[in-house]
Every structure is written in structure tokens, then in C-alpha cells.
Image (tube, rainbow, N blue to C red):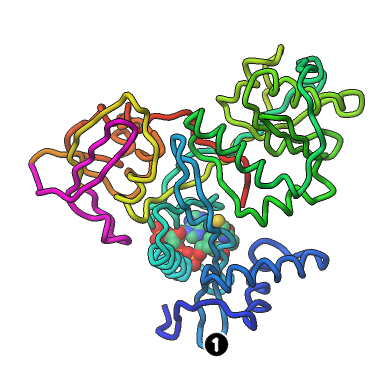
Amino acid sequence: MSDALRFVDITEDQLDAVMRVRARSFGVMAAGDREQWLKDARVFIQDGRYVGVADGDEVVAAARFWDFEQWWSGRPVRMAGVAGVVVAPEYRGRGVGSKLMRGVLQRAVDKGFPLTGLYPATTVIYRHLGYEFGGGRYRFSFPAADLRSLGGKEVAVRRAGPDDAERFLELAGQSHTRRRTSGPLVWPIKEVKEWLADEENFAYLAEDGFVVYNWSGSDLCVDELVAGSDATARALWATVGSGSSIASTVQAYISPDDPLHLLVEHEAYKDVQHQRWMLRLLDAPAAIAARGFAPDVAVEADLRIDDPDVPANTGDWHLSVADGVGRLTPTEASGDVLQLGPRGLAALYAGTPVATLQGAGLVSGRPAAELDTVFASATPYMLDYF
Ligand SMILES: CC(C)(COP(=O)(O)OP(=O)(O)OC[C@H]1O[C@@H](n2cnc3c(N)ncnc32)[C@H](O)[C@@H]1OP(=O)(O)O)[C@@H](O)C(=O)NCCC(=O)NCCS
């Protein structure tokens, strides 16, 4: 790699150059999307979350990251959501992407994010840097007529808009806390308002729930549905299903554990879409402290973490979980302990059984099946692509 390559903060006057690299990576952006893209890009720039690699003055690679929170076992944890990773074709395969991503990791560490996540277009580069699969984004589809007949007519449902954004976030938070959800993102309120203001989205609010859906070709598609009771779930799904005379199918981004699977008469169609996302711990003690744990599980265990790209994670640690709270504290090296790198740590955090990690060579040393119960949660899922 040339010595002239430097990790840089993207500046406004470099956005045209970034766009040229993007066009060669993801396709040429429609002219109508350009203004919005530039507007969004400026927010990332202002907050030091748009970075790149330059060869001399020319930007040849770029990436940005969102300031999200992500629910982990019913508690929100700050997560740097990496997106738009692009390297100019003539610079690919020479370590530029890795240099860029190392810079992203360092910037996210400096900004205090305990976690980072991303949707990989290719897993190789991210695995080399310590990311591993953490969960999936699932799209199920159902016969609209099945949803229409779910009932819930006694529940009042009204149209909603951008002024309801805070209430939507509050209801989603209550639902994720109650269900000890893992995976869903909390978007900045500005994005939630824009989502609810978009004329293409149809939003409805009940006292303890909401739904947002839109057209997807000739189908209807549910972006998100939250319900505090089965009556509200029935009412909101039936609101969407009421379109069954025109749309025969309703697609829905929901968890594989969503109550809808147990409410509808027929199972979802077999055309389930499943897209995996990856996770990485940037600050292991902070990530453990922020995450939820089931109130009735406890463990005391020593671990050895080896994390070459985030050295502060490396060392001998004692994990203590009790009363729904976890702590990771430095400890003296002891004999036969569970040893893991960042990929094993990320997958363990996301609830992957230790036996699976052993089977993939991601952990070694003492078998520690007792960790399965503390890290277990409902299947981690996301609703949104970013
Ligand atoms: C993916 C991308 C960012 C990688 O950048 P890069 O500069 O080529 O990456 P590096 O040279 O640092 O490669 C790092 C590792 O990833 C591997 N890798 C890179 N691109 C790969 C691909 N498309 N398929 C499989 N492996 C790939 C490299 O072989 C290398 O692994 P190795 O050291 O074991 O050989 C770049 O190819 C790109 O911009 N692609 C188009 C846009 C895209 O897909 N972005 C990712 C969105 S999540």
C-alpha cells in the first residue's frame, strides 16, 4: 500500500469525490436522491462520523456510522451502525478497506460506543476485523385475508403523524423492555419524524401500540408493529389486512418470535427473507454493563479475550452476572479458562451457544456451557436496513 494513503475525516468539499466512489460501488444515484444524500452526509460530517482514506488529496474510500441504540435483552446499548463502506475499484484488494475500517473502529471507540454493527455485503473483511453474525432481519409474508379477520374491533385506532414520534419511541421502548428484546434499533428522533411524515407510509396509533406500513408493489408491507396486548395486536394487524380486497399478501418485518405467528390461522408463506447483520464489541466492560440479563440467572466465570484491533478488550476478565446486571472486571490470569477473540465475544454476546462457537473454532479452553443461560435471549432481529 502506498505511504501516501491517509485516514481522513470527510469534508463537505470531498462529497463529490465520495459520490464518485459510491457510484462505482453501489450504482449511480438517481438525480432526485442527490440533495437528500448530501443533506444527510453533512450531519455525519458535523458529528465526526464520516471518514475516509485519501491518496494525496483524492478520497479513494469512505464509510460513515449512525449513532444508534440497540436493544439487548431489554436494555438499550449505544451502537455505531456502519454503512456506505466503499473503496474505489482501482484501490481494492490492497488493504485500503481494512485501513478504512480500522479507522472506523478507532473513531467509534473514541466516541464511546460500546458496540458496532453492520450489514455485510461480504463477510471476509469484517470478520478479519472482529465482527461476527449477531442476528437477522426477517421479512415474513401472510395472506392479507388472515390478518383482516383477526378482530380487535373494540380497540380504537387513529391515524398518526410526525407529532406522534415521541409516543412511538416510548411504546417501542416499553415493548422491548417487557419482552427483553434483542436486536432492534432506536433511530434518532429526527429520522422517526421523517418516517412518519413520509406520505408513502401509513401510520396508525392505538392506546398501547402502533403500526406503520406502505405499499410494496401490489403487496402491503409492515415496517413496524408494536402492541401492548393481544387485542391491540389483532386491531392493528386487521387494519393492515383490511386492504385484502386489493392486496392479497401482507409482508411484515417482524421477529421470528413475534406473537403474530401464534395469532394468525395459517402460517407465514415459505418465502421468508432473512438477511444477517454482524456485531462487534468495542468496549467489552461497557457493553456487558449496558446489556440486560434475565433477572433469575447468575454466573461467575473467568474469560481471556484476545482482541488485536481493540487492545483495551484484551486481557483476563471476570464475568459476574446476577439480578439482571452484568459486570466484566479485570482479573489475574488463571489456568484453564474460556478463551475467545472478538468474533467469539460478539457471537456470545448475541446469544450464540458456546457449543456452536466451539464447533466453529471461535472459543477454546474450558467449556463454559453455563454462559449459554446468561446470554440467551429471544432471537436477535432488526427491522431496518441501514
Ligand atoms: C468490500 C470492499 C469495501 C473491500 O475493500 P478492499 O479495499 O478491497 O478490502 P481489503 O483489501 O482491505 O481486503 C480485506 C479482506 O477482505 C477480502 N475481500 C475484499 N473484498 C472481498 C469480496 N468482494 N469478496 C470476498 N472477500 C473480499 C480480501 O480478500 C481481504 O481478505 P484476505 O486478507 O484474507 O485476502 C470493496 O471491495 C468495495 O468497496 N466493494 C464494493 C462496495 C461494497 O461491497 N461495500 C461493502 C458494503 S458492506
Q: Position of residue 313 (x, y in %)?
A: 27, 55
Residue found 17% across the figure and 49% down from its top: 316
Q: Nearer the viewer, residue 36 or 189?
A: 189
Residue 307 within the segment the image draws in magenta: yes
Q: Amino acid at mark 1?
A: Asp
Q: Residue at x 77, y 37 (%)?
A: 213
Q: Nearer the viewer, residue 187 or 117?
A: 187
Horizontally, is 309 left or right of 268 in the view? Answer: left
- Residue 322 magenta-drawn? yes
Question: Left or right: where does residue 300 sit relative to residue 81?
Answer: left
Residue 223 figure quarter = top right
Q: The N terminus appears in which quarter of the rendering? A: bottom left
Farthest residue, direction top: 265
Quadrant in the picture for residue 254 = top right
343 lies above or below 243: below
Q: Residue at x 71, y 34 (%)?
A: 210
* Residue identifier under label 1: 57
Q: Residues within 10 Å of mark 1 (few under 14, many from 20)?
A: few
On screen, residue 76 above or below 38 = above
Residue in the foreground of this view, choosing between 22 and 232 = 232
Residues drawn in magenta: 305-334
**The image quarter in which residue 266 lies:** top right
In the rendered image, the vertical position of residue 131 relative to residue 242, given as above or below = below
Q: How many labels, in total?
A: 1
Picture coordinates of residue 218, whole percent (x, y): 86, 35
Query: Residue 373's x, y, as percent?
Result: 32, 26
Position in image of residue 271 (x %, y %): 68, 28
